[in-house]
Each structure stands twice: as C-alpha cells, then as structure tokens.
Amino acid sequence: MTRFKMAAAGIVAGGLCLAAPAHADVTADQVWAAWKGVVTGTGQTVRGTEARSGRTLTVSDLTISAAMPDGGSSTVALGSIAFTEENDGSVTIAMAPAFPIMATGRSDEGEKVELNMTVRQPGLSLVASGVPQAIRYDFSAPEIGVTLDRLLVDGAAVDAVLDMVIARGTGRYLVEKGAARQFFDSAFDADRMTLSVSGLNPDDGSRGAITAQIRDISSTSKGALPDAAANGELADMLRAGLDITGGLTHGGMEYRMNVVEAGDTTTIDTRSASGALDFALGEDGMTYAVSSTDTAISISGPEIPLPTLDAALEKVEFRMQMPLLPTEKPADFALLTRLAGLSLSDQIWAMLDPAGQFPRDPATLVLDLAGKSRWTVDITDPTTDTGDAAPGELHALTVRDLRLSLAGAELTGAGDFSFDNSDTTTFDGMPRPEGSLALQLVGGNALLDKLVNMGLVPAEQATGFRMMLGLFARPGAGGDTLVSEITVTENGQVLANGQRLR
C-alpha cells in the first residue's frame, strides 16, 4: 500500500501547497501552466476543461491521476478551480471546499487494495504571485482534514477509520524553474494536528486504535528537483541533482494506542514537551535526525505486573548520516543515539529493588559514532544482490562518546580506529583494524556487590567476573575506578593496557 499512498499524498500536497504573496506580475494562464508543469513533471496526468471569462480562467472537471508500478492507480477529482487575476498582479485560486481521492494498488501479500478518501479545506485562501519563472504561492485555512471513506481488500470492506485534521494552517511554496532543475522553498505552520486511526483485525478479532495530537507545528523545506531521471529511480535522481533539506518542530505531543484482544485492553500513552525532525537528501548522502524533550511513557494491560509501568526521559535523540551512492573515495557517516535522564516510577523500583539498595538517579545512554565508509553497490536499487559479499567498505571509525550511567555506576569511553580493507584474513573476514579505545568504569564494584547482596548474581560468579575484569582493566584515580585502553596494532595484536591478549 505504501506506493499508492505516497502517490496520493503527493497529489494532495500538490493541490494544497500552491500558494504565495509579494508583489507579482503573473497571469491566470501562467499560474495554471506552472501548476500543470509541476504535476506532469512528476509523471502524473492532468485532465480538465479550460474556459476564460474576463480576468478569470476556470478549469472544470479537473482530475490528477497517476499509474503505479504494481498496476494500481490514484486519482484526485478536484472539480472546478478558478484562477482570478487581481489588480496587484497576483492570482487568486478558488478551490472546492472538499474533494475525493481514489487509489488502488497491491499489498505486500498481493491483495488488491482500494481506498477512497476525502480532503476537506473549507475557507481555504490561495494566492499566487511572482513572475512566470518563479511563482510563489501562499495559503491559509482554518482547517485542512483527510478522512478515509472506504477501504476494500480483495473486494471485502475493511472496518477501518482514519481522520486527520490540521487546525489554522498557513504556509508558502515557491517554485522556480531552472535550466535542468526546479527549485522550491516552502514553509508551513499550524496550531494543531490531530489524528485518529482505528481498525479491526479480521484474523483474530482484535481492534486497535491510535489517537494523537501535535501542537505548535512549524516546518520548512527547500531544494531542487531534477527534470531528468523521470523514471523515479532514486540513484538517477540523485546524480541528476536531487537535493532536499528540511525540518519540523513542535511544541508538544500526546499519543495513545489501545489494543483490545479477547476482552483485554493494552494501552500505551506517550507525551513530550517538544520535539524536532531534520532531514537532508542529496548526492552526498542522507541525514535524518529526531529529538524530543521531557518524554513520559505509561503502559497498562493484562501482561503488565503493575497497574501501570511509568517511565520518563529528559532528552531523546537519534541522528544518522550516511552516503547513498557508490563512490571511489570513502564518505562521512555518523550515528548518534542518546537516552538522557531515564527515570522509573516508584512502583517499578519497589518491584525491582524493594530494599532500596540501588541509587535511583536517572540513567543515561549515549553512543556517538562517526567515520568513513563507501558503498561498492547501489543500495537504493531493490534488485541489488551481493550474495555473501559485503555491500561496502568501512575505512575509519571514531567513538566520539560512549556513556552508560545506571544504578550508581558509569561507563565512559572514546577511541579511533582505521581499517585496512585489503586485509580480511587477520581478523577472519573483517577488514583489519588499527587504533585504540579508552574506557573508564566508576562504581562497578559497588554495583556488583549490591547485585550479590540481592541474590541476583551468585558470589562465585561475581568473583570470576572480577578476575576476568582484571585482565582488561587496572585501577584508576579515585575509589572504585577502573580504566582500560584496548589497542589493536598494525600487525593485528590486541593489547589491554599494554598486555597482549591476542
């Protein structure tokens, strides 16, 4: 379903985002021609009847359709749209307060899927301005909504509900025609977005429901879309100049998921005070980053040993940067995972540690990596098959930050390694590393003693663990501190604090 959903969403976005102010000098025919150019440039088909009356160009029975690779299709019936030339050189675009979307396609299991949706946009204000080569569109609407009207799978109706509403949305969208690319720059703000989704699983009779609300939404995006590579293959589009960057922030989110099965209900509640998303896509690679602050999670259900499991996180971050195309030279990559200030409810601690032996300070996990790598095949091509061979090469890895603090103990580390891809025998199939990793553990022995006192770790196992730890670590400055420097030499030796392990 993903392909025709994305196509339908793209058509909706094309219809909703045609808007912009500023002093302008465009005609209704030029705006309509530019609109058609954007839509047909993505491989879609536009049909409608054009009629002129004074300053107004009306396009009646307007439909935008697209064919899917799996034989499916999507169609948006926009009805009549009127383009009216104003005295200041801008063009007002009047659209219907609602229009339908019809789409068909195949599921991953080969089932025929048909869906009908309705887009609502009452009170939409849409204005085009600028010059024919660079038209900017501005829009505002008290409400923009999407509702699922019908969903069929192999001809059978599916019990499903979807309703999304964006309240008080405003935005702009600039399209500029270049020699071989179209450039765009957009922004969108909304007071609130609400989402309600539910459905029945016919296989087991369970019902799931999701409700969500996001407040104070603000987003921007800009970039270039190539005229070439119309076949839509990502690698070809990247080589032709596809370049997109953007981001989104919000001022608070609530999310609830319910699953009812055999009369029992499992509920997951999540909320956060703020969040952000950033992305970039281009020939140099892709970047994707998400974050949230003051996140709280609550889980209840028949499998939960407490009335609710409650946890909170002060900061959550995930960031990934990686190349997408095969290159001769290694390219930058990075990966960051941060879970900061994880705290558990008193009920969970009472179950895990009734005697209160562990410090209940918030826990933190950080893994921050960077390096150099290169793909040797096109990973964007779903038909790529490397067999048993690796699809790429790792050339350098830097551990910028490694941190785990939990129950009064903290492990930290940092290091650098390079990799010789011409030598895959020294380390049995992997490129030979060279470099070092510095580690420090504070409070480890005290934590192990508490685990022994609680009966969670047998005393003889703790003794064996301390003996093994002695092979890798030595006492550091301060009480209950162990340090270790793991080094891999050029000739393949592995050392711990100068002592050879391999």
Image (cartoon, helix red, strand yellow):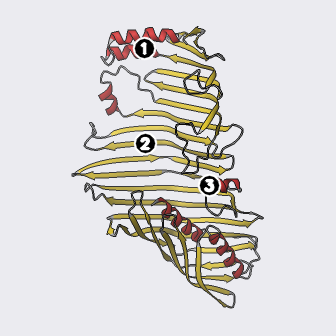
Residue at 36% in and 39% down: 310
Q: Disc 3 marks which amino acid?
A: Leu
Viewer-proximal residue, 345 or 65?
65
Query: Which residue is denoted by mark 1 in the rendering?
Result: 446
Query: Which residue is denoted by mark 3 in the rendering?
Result: 234
Q: Disc 2 marks which amino acid?
A: Ala
How far across and how far down the image is residue 22, in percent? Answer: 73, 70
Question: Which-is-in-front pick, marks 2 and 3?
Answer: 3
Q: State the image quarter where residue 34 is shown.
A: bottom right
Residue at 47% in and 16% down: 443
Which callout, 2 or 3, points at the residue further toward the start of the chain? 3
Question: Which-is-in-front pick, marks 2 and 1?
Answer: 1
Q: Is residue 274 above or below residue 84?
A: above
Viewer-proximal residue, 274 or 47?
47
Q: Residues within 10 Å of mark 2 (few under 14, many from 20)?
A: some
How far across and how far down the image is residue 10, in percent? Answer: 56, 65
